[in-house]
Amino acid sequence: MAKIHVTDREGQDHELEATKGWSVMEIVRENDLPIEAACGGCCACATCHVYVDEAWLPKLKAADDEEDRMLDEAYQVQENSRLSCQINFSDELDGLKITLAPEF
Amino acid sequence: MSDIIQTDMIIIGAGPVGLFTVFEAGLLNMSCHLVDNLDKIGGQCAELYPDKPIYDIPAVPHCTGQQLTDLLMQQIEPFNPVFHLNQQAEAVERQDDGKWRLTTSIGTVLEAPAIVIAAGAGSFVPRRLPLAGAEEREGQSLHYVVRRMEDFRGKSIVIAGGGDSALDWTLNLQPLASSLALVHRRDDFRAAPDSVSKMRELVAADDMALHIGQITELHGSAPELEAVTIKNPDGETVVPCDTLLAFYGLKMELGPIADWGLNLEKNLIDVNTETFETNVEGIFAIGDIITYPGKLKLILSGFHESALMCQKAFKYCFPDDKLVFRYTTSSTDLQKKLGVA
């Protein structure tokens, strides 16, 4: 089974089973980690904000304009900030490392 | 006591489920007043995804959030709902005659035998800066809304954000302010292009400043403000100011409802699934804000919950009347209420 590694806001690491075809937000949410995802994953809010481990950034499809615009409503946005509902999990992302951004 | 509004049902939340409740209640002769903290009708459908498609409304193969709101408004029009927008349902108090009295954040007072909470994920409130010293400064040197422009005359203002609120207030307050700087995390704005070009003209004429970056620190002795630190990949800048306006959009939170004595489970309201009544008699809850075994957060589930809820609410509104179950297809009585017979 593919995995992703999530660091929560207390700095604790979680290894989660990852299902192909799910968004990273869905994987985090279905594992009961605290992610608000207020809009349900349609890129209409910024409450699934995560930081992607630098090593994994090149493997991700770049954020589109809509995602970049929504990140305006996030806080402590960094170069490696993404909305996790917009990252579709596939086999190439097995082992992906992310950190949940602070709640805002 | 003449300014207390009397009605049959007070609905908290003017999203799709709250709106459809006007219809279901109306068929049973109950008239409704709705309270919502947003400045518009439609809840999340209007605020979060007005242009996003929805494909799972029964018999509506495709609509947007805004279209769904418009269609519901058309459907409930015969029942003349009254809206109280821009205000949050704050306190409820049981009256001696058994009615509930609800007071809003701006002092509207409503009374009804039934209150229905259809508040989705809670009410929309401004996102607050999660910085040390922000809370102590709120309403003093740090603001998330502008109530009176005149309060900002002669101030040295920093405005944060890249949407319409940030740009509109930049343009409105710039002539009044002693100095004004706009801060946004990137040199691209989602606000209306016309406002953006006006802002850029002011920057070019040296009438205001534009900083690309994010505010990371507030300086001065709270509640006063002396400066803010703005950080970007190239480094940090300290911008002197006495007033900060932050427009980072809205977030949803449960708000005062949390203190109404309702049984909550992870910020969701427990209900009886036969009546959608909460543990408090006469207070009902439907839609995304509730939880029960098997609950799905779908608009269509909220519609169903609304219909069942109205059966019980009717008993509080008209305790002496018998309720007869009828279809709009066959009942002339219902058709008269809809204005079609």
Image (spheres, coloured by chain):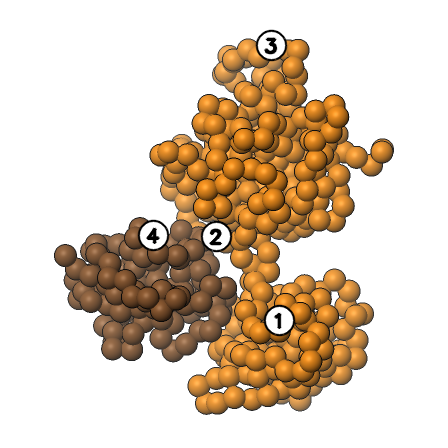
Chain colours: A brown, B orange
**Residue B110 location, quadrant:** top right
- Could you tell me the amino acid type at mark 3? Lys
Nearer to the camera, B45 or B238: B238
Label 4 element class = loop
Frontmost of labels 3 and 2 is: 3
CA distance for labels 4 and 2: 25 Å
CA distance for labels 1 and 2: 30 Å
Of callouts 1 and 2, which one flags the residue occurring earlier in the amino acid sequence?
A: 2
Of callouts 3 and 2, which one flags the residue occurring earlier in the amino acid sequence?
A: 2
Label 3 element class = loop
Q: Are marks 3 and 1 in contact (CB under 8 Å)?
A: no
Judge the density around disc 1: few (<14), some (14-19), many (≥20) Cα neighbours within 10 Å.
some
Mark number, residue A32: 4
- Could you tell me the amino acid type at mark 4? Asp
Label 1 element class = helix
- Could you tell me the amino acid type at mark 2? Tyr
Mark number, residue B134: 1
Is the residue at mark 3 from the same chain as the one at mark 2? Answer: yes
Q: Are marks 4 and 2 in contact (CB under 8 Å)?
A: no
Chain designation of label 1: B
Judge the density around disc 2: few (<14), some (14-19), many (≥20) Cα neighbours within 10 Å.
some
Residue located beneath label 3 in the image: B322
Is the residue at mark 3 from the same chain as the one at mark 1? Answer: yes
CA distance for labels 3 and 2: 41 Å
Residue pictured at 46% horizontal, 73% vertical: A76
* Whole-percent x, y for residue B31 in the image: 66, 27
- Could you tell me the amino acid type at mark 1? Ala
Quadrant the C terminus of chain B occupies: top right
